[in-house]
Amino acid sequence: MPELPEVETVRRGLEALLKGDSIKSARVLRDASIEFPDVPTFEKSVRGHSFGAVARRGKYLLLELDNGAGLACHLRMSGRLIVRDGSASKKKSVTKSVEKPVKKPVKKPAKVDTREPQFLRVIFLLESGRELHFEDMRVFGRLWYKPKGASFEQIIPTLAELGVEPFDDLDGKYLQKAFSKKVQAVKTALLDQRILAGVGNIYADESLFLSGLHPATAAKLIKLSQLETLSNNIKMVLDRAIISGGSTLRDYSDSSGVNGKYQNEALVYGREGEPCRQCGHRIERIKLGGRSSHYCPFCQPKPRASKKNKGVREK
């Protein structure tokens, strides 16, 4: 699933490409891709609106439209918002047909994705002659239209439940308070979007490695000085990933179809069995809360449970 760096990369690209352009019409090819309102109302409501600024909250994209309206998107596992040439969807017939079986994607080096849109769910025809496509192979992504007078939080209640943005209000004291009663593994706590918005599996692993923290360490046992280091490393890792255009492991690409490159720089994520770039020991992988966690057993030693904390169980 795209995390903060991927969504932020898409945000920046969309704002640069769309600002000032307008929607001539919209065509929904898969009804379930529209979360709010119903499909006919969605297609009618977005028509004629021009694009303004594009914001991000956690992993949500929030596109400003004129007259107080808005368009929200959550890419989920494989969604993509891509601005394409106006002839892209005309290269083949695009209908609401039964979808073909999904073939397992093959990893490719970073490059511009020039494939014809195979998993097109929504087409926005723009006044500029271009098209904004919402493409989604695994069909979990969603779009919302925000009418004038409403807020994004009203139509997407989970937005109000999100924790702090890493670049805005994250520091050691915040994590200390958020983790104070968390006996769960710190890796699991970092993935809780109610604590920290936008951080996912990849960048949690990378940040814990740089901080020398074992992913299974009970969150409440981590000292303030360590949490300060962790918060700084989270920001640094996210910043590096944004500069690299995010990570492309399977389906992700930016708003122009360009793949991310951070996966080539990863220190531990996806490198099970490979030598640690810091000490040479082999990277290991464990399961925490149903998610894979990559770490170096030498650089991130599992802390010994003291008698005082004997009752705290680390996953």
Image (spheres, rainbow, N blue to C red):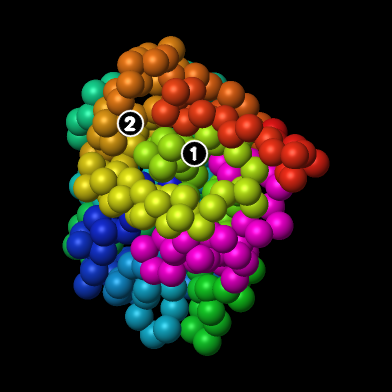
Q: Quadrant of residue 52?
A: bottom left
Judged by its main secondary structure, the magenta piece is: helix
Crowdedness of circle 2 by 10 Å Cα count: few (<14), some, many (20+)? Answer: some
Q: Nearer the viewer, residue 122 or 212?
A: 212
- Total labels: the figure holds 2
Crowdedness of circle 1 by 10 Å Cα count: few (<14), some, many (20+)? Answer: many
Name the amino acid, label 2: Ala
Q: In the displayed orientation, state which residue is furthest to the right.
A: 311
Q: In the displayed orientation, state which residue is furthest to the front.
A: 307
Find out whether residue 179 is within the magenta segment: yes
Q: Give above or below for 208 relative to 98.
A: below
* Residue 37 horizontal/vertical position (percent): 60, 66
Can residue 43 be seen?
A: no
* Residue 10 horizontal/vertical position (percent): 31, 52
Q: Which residue is mark 1?
A: 213
**Residue at 41%, 42% in the rendered image:** 211
Q: Which residue is mark 2?
A: 266
For marks 2 and 1, the one nearer the N-term is: 1
Contact, mark 2 vs mark 1 (Cβ under 8 Å): no
* Residue 144 horizontal/vertical position (percent): 53, 63
Name the amino acid, label 1: Leu
**Residue at 48%, 23% in the rendered image:** 297
Can residue 67 be seen?
A: yes
Q: Give above or below for 241 relative to 62.
A: above
**Residue at 35%, 80% in the rendered image:** 66
Find out whether residue 35 is within the magenta segment: no
Distance (Cα) linking label 2 and label 1: 17 Å
Q: Which residues are magenta?
A: 158-187
Q: Quadrant of residue 99?
A: top right
Q: Does residue 36 appear left or right of residue 46 in this picture? A: right
